[in-house]
Image: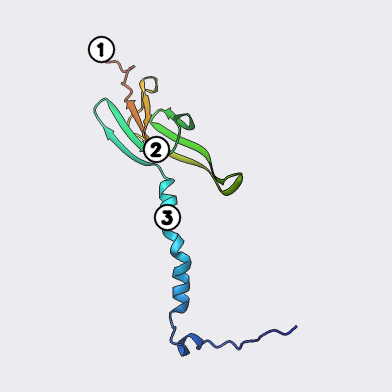
Amino acid sequence: MAGNLMRFSPFNNIARFEPLREFEDMFRELRLAPAVQAFEAAQTMKMDVSETEKAYTVKVEIPGMKKDDIKIDVNGNQVSISAETSQTKEQKDGETVVRSERFSGRLYRDFSLSHEIDADHALAKYQDGILELTLPKKTRSGAKLLTIS
């Protein structure tokens, strides 16, 4: 069994006028980087929060989820949103599976607000990939002005 041996020459690319060949190979491998970055960007919850005197309105982008897959927890001034999904796509040509893809993932967002939330009157609505929360501020009941006798 005979093998071909080749002598390594560090100047080989320069001699062939290809001094940037390794860089070109590296950039060819990185062509997938934009797709990976787009996938990672799609896996974060983008959020807008607005405030009035009485309540907060929170709008969160969670595309591709079912409302049953989204959980919201309000505790004091802490709000936690999590969404979990599992999807399977299959492409068939007759009885033969040509392509099968699976995705399973969990998104999570936790944040604090300046005021405590009245969780009993909070509302959540999910439509067209947008979760909208109406979080009324808790009134400061229990405070009492005392008169001195």
* In the rendered image, the vertical position of residue 118 relative to residue 12, given as above or below: above
Q: Position of residue 108 (x, y in %)?
A: 46, 40
- Dot 2 or dot 3: first in sequence order is 3
Q: Position of residue 87 (x, y in %)?
A: 52, 40
Say which of 144 and 120 sits in front: 120
* In the rendered image, the vertical position of residue 137 relative to residue 100, given as above or below: above
Task: Single out the residue that lies furthest toward the front.
Answer: 94
Q: Which residue is mark 1?
A: 147
Q: Which residue is mark 2?
A: 111
Q: CA distance from mark 2 to mark 1?
A: 39 Å
Q: Quadrant of the C terminus?
A: top left
Q: Nearer the viewer, mark 2 or mark 1?
A: 2
Dot 2 amino acid type = Phe
Dot 1 amino acid type = Thr
Q: Residues within 10 Å of mark 1 (few under 14, many from 20)?
A: few
Q: Quadrant of the N terminus?
A: bottom right
Q: Position of residue 37 (x, y in %)?
A: 42, 55
User: How is the structure coloured here?
Assistant: rainbow
Question: In the figure, is residue 69 to the left or right of 50?
Answer: right
Q: CA distance from mark 1 to mark 3?
A: 63 Å
- Residue at 44% over, 46% down: 43
